Image: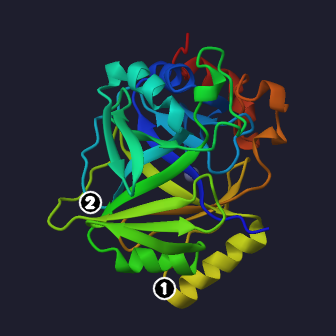
Amino acid sequence: MVRNGIHHVTAIAGKARQNLDFYTRTLGLRLVKKTVNFDDPGAYHFYYGDEAGSPGTILTFFPWEHAAPGRAGSGELQETVFRVPLASIGYWTARLAAQGVQRGGRFGETLLTFRDPDGMRLALVGLPGIEAEPAWDNGEIPVEHAIRGFHSVSLLISDAARTGAILSDVFGFAAAGREGETHRFQAEGTAVGGIVDLRVAAGVGPARLGRGSVHHLAFRAADDAAEFAMVRRLAENHGLQTTEQKDRDYFRSVYFREPGHVLFEIATDVPGFAVNEPLASLGSALKLPRFLEGHRAEIEAALPALA
Ligand code: ZN
């Protein structure tokens, strides 16, 4: 079975509690893992997704209470787009009124664009025929309207050629049309998280990372063998080196900066979020990597309050 497409998107937030409220209540995603930033255990790392945290549905955040706002620009992931049923566009237009939602279109699809409380650019695409797909019930949003994973992401870069070549040659995407300066790439047979749009912007200054910015974009690899095959292709065909593989507990990852300066990750589908918590209670307990478990008491005392 081919498994291509987006694995997850990781962004930077400000206040943890505000982030948790917005994504689990306003957008109705499931908190599938509550852990800490492995490199900075004084901060949370939240993972939101569908019921199981399936690849292609996972948006993650490093909330830093006092993070300075990011600045939009070239060399970053500019917009993260979720799928909702087409018939739910009216529901979401009303629900997101306070977020300054605007209706538009792209590649013939109906699009609602808005911002999260930290200014991160988000959108919903209304798609026909997805009502029957399973969705997470957050107890507040009628399940027929619920988000069904990622539709796409848009990268703002100065030149699409080399990034597009990597999407096609390494990650299983194919060129799927162009609208103005936006080049669409689609992973064949991947309904959820299967689209990357490359927006070419000449003369735009570089993005500065901060609150509301996306930190990196992760692509799927079925397992370690698939990941290492991608690493070899990057080196042999594109002259790019990745980091060594890092164990993120729920997937195993390598990282590299693509030619448009966006940080890319390759993450395995295995082992997934149910590796250390039952599916029914995902996200309810603070999970720490083994190397931090001995410091649990200090870590819990230092993390910001969520209620
Ligand atoms: Zn990641």
Q: CA distance from mark 2 to mark 1?
A: 21 Å
The image position of residue 16, as x and y in percent, is 48, 24
Q: Residue furthest left?
A: 203
Are there few (<14), some (14-19), or many (20+) residues within 10 Å of tag 2? Answer: many
Quadrant placement of the N terminus: bottom right
Q: Report the side of 143 relative to 196 (left or right).
A: right
The image position of residue 307, as x and y in percent, is 55, 9
Q: Amino acid at mark 2?
A: Ser
Q: Report the side of 181 relative to 122 (left or right).
A: left
The image position of residue 39, as x and y in percent, is 55, 45
Q: Amino acid at mark 1?
A: His
- Which of the labelled discs sits on residue 49, or is there none? none
Q: Is residue 38 above or below residue 190?
A: above
The image position of residue 45, as x and y in percent, is 57, 36
In the picture of the structure, the residue carrying the numbered disc 2 is 74
Colour approach in the figure:
rainbow
Are there few (<14), some (14-19), or many (20+) residues within 10 Å of tag 1? Answer: some
Sequence-wise, the earlier of marks 2 and 1 is 2
In the picture of the structure, the residue carrying the numbered disc 1 is 238
Q: Nearer the viewer, residue 61 or 100?
A: 100
* Image quadrant assignment for residue 130: top right
**Which residue is drawn at the image coordinates 70% and 45% (left, top)?**
54
Q: Is residue 192 above or below residue 173?
A: above
Q: Is residue 129 above or below residue 303?
A: below
Q: Nearer the viewer, residue 128 or 47?
A: 128
**Which residue is drawn at the image coordinates 76% and 47% (left, top)?**
272
Q: Nearer the viewer, residue 122 or 224?
A: 122
Q: Nearer the viewer, residue 183 or 247?
A: 183
